[in-house]
């Protein structure tokens, strides 16, 4: 085969350190745009970036030129440095060490887009921890609760 063809949609989820509720307007929208820009620069076309006060959701297409681990390193390190410059209250901002990344069937992209777009309404009823556990269960990911949150 002479050509490499790839179409891998990823739903990426990661939280602030200790799930601190620290992502608020106006920096929230700027952060989402900044994260989308990092994806774009790495040829990981962003579909939607959203989240809530203590976590981020990114739906993007993983480039055939980059490993997921490298994408995550770039997203978290650059956005953490950037957000610390936005306000005195964000000087000690950190992301948690881990992340979740789940493949998305192209036929379900619209459903994931709607899910990410409705985070504020969603989290009026459900905590980030409950949301994340539901993802782990849906994707049949084995995990140890002691190590997921810190």
Image (cartoon, rainbow, N blue to C red):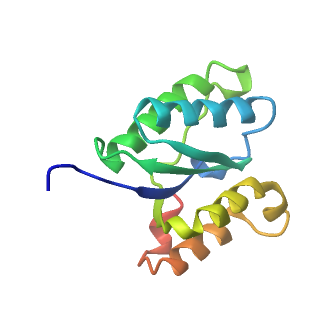
Residue drawn at (35%, 49%) of the image: 68
Position of 150 with respect to 118 (left or right) is left
Q: Front-most of 113 and 145?
A: 113
Q: Can I make out residue 68 in this image? A: yes
Residue drawn at (66%, 69%) of the image: 131
Residue drawn at (66%, 57%) of the image: 113
Residue 81 in the image: x percent, y percent?
52, 25
Q: Is residue 47 shown above or below 111?
A: above
Residue 84 in the image: x percent, y percent?
61, 24
Position of 72 with respect to 37 (left or right) is left
Question: How many numbered tags mark residues here?
Answer: 0
Residue 12 in the image: x percent, y percent?
51, 55
Q: Quadrant of residue 29?
A: top right
Residue 138 in the image: x percent, y percent?
54, 79
Q: Can I make out residue 16 in this image? A: no
Instruction: Name the residue furthest front.
Output: 2
Quadrant of image for the N terminus: bottom left
Q: Quadrant of residue 135?
A: bottom right
Q: Is residue 24 shown above or below 123?
A: above
């Amino acid at each position: 085969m002479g050509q490499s063809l790839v179409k891998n949609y990823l739903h990426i989820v990661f939280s602030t350190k200790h799930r601190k509720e620290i992502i608020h307007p106006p920096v929230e929208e700027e952060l989402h745009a900044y994260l989308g820009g990092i994806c774009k620069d790495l040829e990981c076309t962003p579909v939607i970036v959203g989240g809530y006060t203590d976590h981020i959701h990114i739906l993007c297409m993983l480039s055939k030129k980059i490993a997921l681990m490298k994408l995550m390193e770039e997203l978290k390190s650059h956005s953490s440095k950037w957000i610390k410059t936005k306000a005195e209250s964000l000087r000690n901002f950190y992301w948690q060490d881990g992340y979740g990344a789940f493949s998305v069937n192209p036929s379900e992209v619209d459903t994931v887009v709607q899910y990410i777009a409705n985070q504020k309404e969603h989290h009026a009823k459900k905590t980030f921890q409950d949301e994340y556990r539901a993802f782990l269960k849906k994707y049949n990911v084995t995990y140890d609760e002691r190590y997921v949150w810190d």
